Image: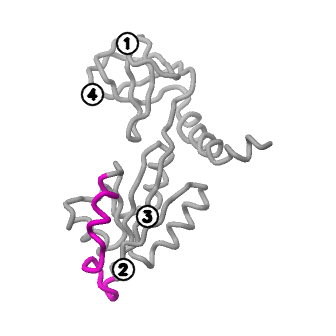
Amino acid sequence: MEWVLENAVDMKRYARFVMEDIISHVSTWTAITKEDVKEGQQVYLKMEKGLLYVSSTEKTGASGTVISDAAAGDDVGVTSLKGLIDLENATITICKVPRIERGGSRKVDIERLKPLASSKPYIAAIGVEALIALRKIGVSPNVMFGTNESVIEAAYHGLSSLVVSVDEQVASLLNRLETENLEYELVDLTLE
C-alpha cells in the first residue's frame, strides 16, 4: 500500500499513456528513425524530447518491428511492441509576471528568467506581457495558445516545460496541473 501511495502519480501518468498512446494505436506506432532501417527489422524504442525514436543499435527496454524501409530521420511504423518505453519525469516551472497595469514586462526580473528559460526544452507563454519578457531574452515560445493543455501533453511525453504567465492566469493553470496530478514549481518574477 505504501508503494502504491508513493507511486500513484507515476501510475496515473503511465495509465494515461497506455490509454491514449498504446491502446489507440495498438497495431502500429509512428516513430522517427535514428538510422536507416529495413522492413521487418527489430528496433528499440526511446522517447526523447517528447518524440518517439527507433534505433537498431541503441538498446532500450522496449522493442518492435518496423513495417517498411526508412532512411535516418524519416517516420516509420513499428508493430509487435514489447516492453516498456522509459519516460523521463517531466518538470514544470511556472513563472508569474505582472499584468500591464502593474508594469508588464518592464517589471519582470529578466536576469532570473534567463537561466529558467535555458533549463527547459519546451517554453510556453500566456499573455502578451509573458511573450515580451521572453523576447527580451531572445526566446520565442513553442506555444502561446492552448498553453495549459499543451504543457500537460508535453509532460505526459516526458518533456519538461517553462510557462511564463501573466499573474491572473496562473490560478487556472495550477488548477489544471493539480487535476492531472502533475508537479510544478512556481516562481514570481515580479520586480519590487
**Left or right, 178 with reference to 167:** right
Q: Residue flagged by tag 3: what amino acid is it?
A: Ile
Of label 1 and label 4, which has the lower sequence position? 1
Residue identified by numbered label 1: 39
Q: Quadrant of residue 167?
A: bottom left
Residue 62 in the magenta stretch? The answer is no
Relative to 101, say whether 94 is above or below: above
Q: Secondary structure at mark 3?
A: strand
Residue identified by numbered label 4: 73
> For the residues carrying marks 2 and 4, which lies nearer the camera in this image?
2
Q: Secondary structure at mark 4?
A: loop
Badge 4: few (under 14), some or many (20 or more) residues near its Cα, within 10 Å?
some
What are the residue bounds of the magenta stretch? 99-118
Residue 156 vs residue 119, the one in the foreground:
119
Q: For marks 3 and 2, give the CA distance.
A: 13 Å
Of label 1 and label 2, which has the lower sequence position? 1
Q: Residue flagged by tag 1: what amino acid is it?
A: Glu
Residue 108 in the magenta stretch? The answer is yes
Tell me the tag on residue 98. 2
> For the residues carrying marks 1 and 3, which lies nearer the camera in this image?
3
Of label 1 and label 3, which has the lower sequence position? 1
> For the residues carrying marks 4 and 3, which lies nearer the camera in this image?
3
Residue 141 appears at what percent x and percent y?
A: 29, 59
